[in-house]
Amino acid sequence: MTLPMERHVLVVFPHPDDEAFGVSGTIATYIKQGIPVTYACLTLGEMGRNLGNPPFATRETLPQVRKQELLASAKSMGVTDLRMMGLRDKTIEFEDDEKMVGMMENLIEDTNPSLVITFYPNYAVHPDHDATGRAMIRAIRRMPEENRPTIYALAFSNNSKEDLGEPDIIHNIKDSRDEKMGSMRAHISQTAWMLQEMDKRLADGEPEAENWLHFERFYTYDFNKDFE
């Protein structure tokens, strides 16, 4: 499937592996179409819960492990503009609001995107996810309406479909399945058990597993909604 053409796509998430499951196929597809993609990852996921059994890392060494995994994921997707923003995992929600909005404004000014992909505030489960999406929405809301990029937002909380309805953007990324699997496998320190389950479901021929691999879903953010 060919995705709609964009001038530049800016992807902003707080953790390594946030991109892998929900948007890596979309990212890879845009890149294969010659559309520039910038991926800004706010932290190195240093508070990730999985240290292995037996441990493969300590709390001190985990950031470097996850950094290398993030680099491998970017390579799998074809991303050459990967930005590590240097914030600390599980603290995004406590960062100064203006600092966060300013960071998003700088990314927008530097990349001039026609499309931004991030989390949908209040519908993304993790406080860091919600805080990242909130800062991006606030930054774009300050722009003149005619200059605003489109926002594709990921929402997967239990009440997202009840409150927001069905996702209104569905990308068939079957032709980028290998890149998506590569991105997921790159983050093996955090995804090993999920991948084992996924491989089992695929081997059993479960349609839902194939469907999940081949389609990525987004909400177009409505600026008339109040997320505060």
Image (cartoon, grey):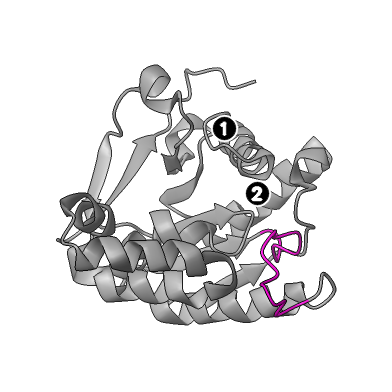
Q: Measured from the top left, where is residue 70 in percent x and y? A: 58, 74
Relative vertical location of residue 32 with respect to residue 124 in this rendering, above or below:
below
Q: Hey, which residue is sitting farthest front in the picture?
A: 54
Relative vertical location of residue 174 with respect to residue 129 in this rendering, above or below:
below
Does the CB distance between marks 2 and 1 fall below 8 Å?
Answer: no
The magenta stretch is 42-57
Task: Left or right? Give the position of 97 relative to 155.
Answer: right
Secondary element at image label 1: loop
Q: Which mark is residue 22?
A: none
Residue identifier under label 2: 104
Q: Quadrant of residue 25?
A: bottom left
Q: Measured from the top left, where is residue 69 in percent x and y? A: 58, 77
Residue identifier under label 1: 121
Task: Left or right? Give the position of 58 relative to 147.
Answer: right
Q: Measured from the top left, where is residue 98 in percent x and y? A: 79, 38
Q: Who comes first in sequence, dot 2 or dot 1? A: 2
Q: Residue at x 79, y 57 (%)?
A: 88
Q: Quadrant of the C terminus?
A: top right
Tag nearer the camera, 2 or 1: 1
33, 179: nearer the viewer: 179
- 38 within the magenta span: no
Q: Measured from the top left, where is residue 129 in percent x and y? A: 61, 43
User: Can residue 53 be seen at all in this image of the molecule?
Assistant: yes
